[in-house]
Image: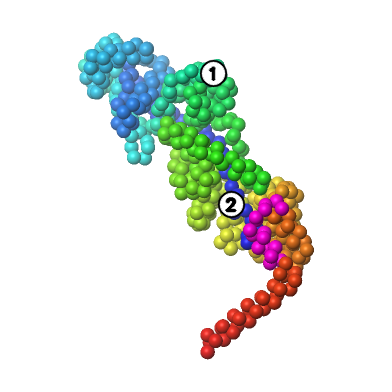
Amino acid sequence: MRPGLLGLFLPALALLAPAAACAKTPYQKAADELAKGMAEGSKVCVLPFLYVGGGQNSRGGAVVAERLTTELIKSGKLKILERELLEEILGEMKRQGKGLTGEAQARKAGKLLGADFAVSGSMLKKTDGTIELNARAIAVETGEVKAAAKAVIKENWLEKFPELSDKDMAGNVAFSYCKPGLEALDKGEFEKAADWFSKAIGVEENGACGINVPGMAYMGRAMAYKNTNRGNDDSDALPEDPGYNITLAARDKVKSEMPENDKKLARYNALIKAMPDNAEAYYRRGIIYTGKKQYKSGVKDYNAAIKLAPDKAAYYYARGYALAMSRLYDNAIMDFSQAIKLSPRFSAAYAGRGIVYMTLNQHAKAMKDYDKALEIAPGEPVTYSDRGACFVNTGQYEKAVADYDKAVELDGNFAEAYYGRGLAYSGLKEYDKALKDLDKALALRPGFKNAMAARAEVNDKKSGRYDKYNKDIQKSRELFQDEEAE
């Protein structure tokens, strides 16, 4: 009958990682290499890349071409042909059955456009989810490859963006903001993309972009933030120390909202399909699975999130919880420890590791973690309750009562804290106080089985029956051992 809250969980949403401000992107590096082989003032067209492994209708080849175009324009030494003209020529070639499948076709397109150089190439999606980009700058007149570049990129674009249907005015306005946001993402203009998606959220709170896909604008903005040095200013983001401040009432509220999680799950399934390299999407879907007690699915999503963003403390904390609930305690300790290493003032990670240590009867380690958690976040009733449980388990009943006093002071409706204090009073043989607390726990949580069992035991202790049957049990053991010895 452990009085702590092993099943209590509210993983905090971590900030999305800012990109290094000075480091060049793979697109910038590729553009620099290509520009070296083309004379200043040359007219250049950038053709869509062949995307091997990207799906029949993938936008990837066009998106990568758009991003390389942007970087080549920034060099200032080349004349990049207008995108509209290029699309018109490509469309005409397609209608005539002259598809772009090699350098000969790239040269043909370049000649029709009056270009000096045509940039084309291929993309190969690898088993680890990254993409190998090979780009070439081809002299249109001779067909000679004047420069080549190779890079590893990520599929950080939206594969599908539905057309606007008949919506209300807010939906129309939101779509008008999301569309240029998407275009800015394609070009790698992440600051602009973030601003457009923020405007969309401002007029349509659920971020549906006017296309009935709730969360789309938030995911688009998250992707933009991830690739800039701005950080994430979403309203649901929390500071470094998320705390461990979920009380019983808050947990009950979370439980009451669980049916909504089915809708959220469907939404994240669609978003992950559209954005397979977005760590935050996997993390949030993992939280939903964990809330539904589908811990294996949760761990799988946390694994994906950590692989994509290995520096996020909250991701390790969330996986640690799911592993602990799966009774994989050693692995859970490793994850909580990693969360602490990444974020030394992460009070929830100390408290979570303390719970696992206490489950393993490593009470000294658990006590140390609870002390640290309360040093960082002294207003958390749950942590006081869990440390109180540790004191009960080690027979330090007076210290346990003090911790439970603090827990119920912070949350007067905390049934588990009253239950735990009831056990502590029972250990001190203050049975009337114990019964009063256990009655309070049952009033707050009717059907609280542990409290019911504890109350029956306390009544037996108070009446003397407990000592009587305890003596009989001890006597039976002695007699049994004597018989075995004979």
Q: Position of residue 100 (x, y in %)?
A: 26, 21
Count every numbered label the image shows and give the total: 2
Q: Nearer the viewer, mark 2 or mark 1?
A: 1
Give whichever of 457, 195 is nearer the camera.
Answer: 457
Q: Which residues are magenta?
A: 443-458
Q: Is residue 423 left or right of residue 315?
A: right
Q: Which residue is mark 1?
A: 168
Q: Quadrant of residue 139?
A: top left
* Residue 59 x %, y %: 36, 25
Q: Visible in this render: residue 191?
A: no
Looking at the rendering, which quadrant does residue 185 occupy? Answer: top left
Q: What residue is at 58 percent from the left and 63 percent from the top?
A: 361
Task: Kindly identify the residue that appears in the image at 49 percent across and 38 percent down.
Answer: 265
Q: Position of residue 331 (x, y in %)?
A: 49, 54
Q: Amino acid at mark 2?
A: Gly
Q: Position of residue 81 (x, y in %)?
A: 35, 12
Residue denoted by label 2: 7
